[in-house]
Image (cartoon, helix red, strand yellow):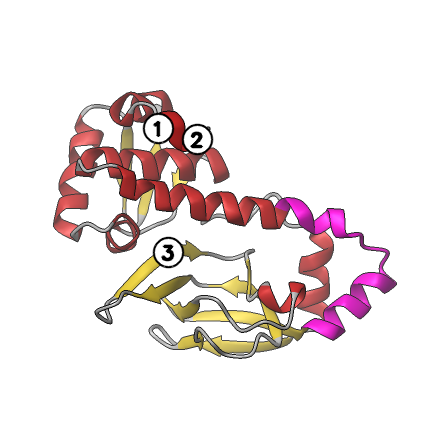
Amino acid sequence: MAESIQLSPLVREIFTKYGTRRRYHAGEVLEQKGDAALQAGYLAEGHIRTFCLSPNGDEISLFYLGPGELFGSAALLSRSPVMVSLSAVTDAEACLLPADRFWARWAEAGGTPQDLLTHFVRRITMLSDYLCCAHFTEDDKRVAYFLHTCCAASGPVIPYTHEQIAAVTGMSRISVTRILRRFRKAGILRQAYRRIEVLQPHRLLEVFGSLGYFLD
């Protein structure tokens, strides 16, 4: 996802100035569910995903994060265990900072809780949006809804690969590619290498229709 417009610039400044930089290789696990939530991270480069395990042990991707996003935020809110696991989708670099050091710097800079509130509300909304994809049984509606919510959150350029979209929507990559090709031929979007640009968001809305009481 593109850099969050709702993440306070002060958060980015604190993490990049005082945090410890660490690089991760694609596939490397950053955090596991149940770990102690001791530090948060600001993603400077690359993409990571949050995931959980199904009862039969399969990994279920919840959502993806890109440069400019905050992860491990549970450490900033409480000392409770990590709720979902994190792994690197691509090679990535992050600035890590223990919660107590972050809040100390935050207070010194005059930050208020309200400055972070919109970020956490947005994160909850984003997860809710992705879970709503499961409401649709038709694959084209799942993809249309996913693209529409991404477009509404961060603009018309969708920085996800076909594999990532497939993981979030619970589909195969082949199915996602076929549907995106259909949307492209219909003039709803255009594609280039590792780039999807939504041209007509309202056409996506027409594909999946209304969620009705799911949004009430």
Q: Residue at x 59, y 63 (%)?
A: 73
* Comes first in the chain, label 1 or label 3: 3
- The residue tagged with tag 1: helix, strand or loop? loop
Residue carrying label 3: 62
Residue 48, position as x, y percentages in the image: 42, 63
C-alpha separation, residue under disc 2 versus residue under disc 3: 19 Å
Q: Eyeballing the image, is 82 above or below 113?
A: below
Instruction: Name the one closer to the observer, 105 or 138.
Output: 138
Q: Residue at x 38, y 77 (%)?
A: 28
Give the number of the disc on residue 211.
Answer: 1
Residue 54, position as x, y percentages in the image: 27, 65
Q: Main secondary structure of the magenta part?
A: helix
Q: Mark 1 or mark 3: which is in front?
A: 1
Range of residues picked out in magenta: 99-118
Q: Mark 2 or mark 3: which is in front?
A: 2
Q: Eyeballing the image, is 105 above or below 166?
A: below
| Pointer 2 local density, CA inside 10 Å: few below 14, some 14–19, many at least 20 | few
Q: Eyeballing the image, is 33 above or below 191?
A: below
Residue carrying label 2: 215
Evaluate whether residue 156 shows in this view.
no
Question: What amino acid is found at the position of numbered circle 1 in the picture?
Answer: Leu
* Comes first in the chain, label 2 or label 3: 3
Q: Quadrant of residue 14?
A: bottom right
Question: What amino acid is found at the position of numbered circle 2 in the picture?
Answer: Leu
| Pointer 3 local density, CA inside 10 Å: few below 14, some 14–19, many at least 20 | many
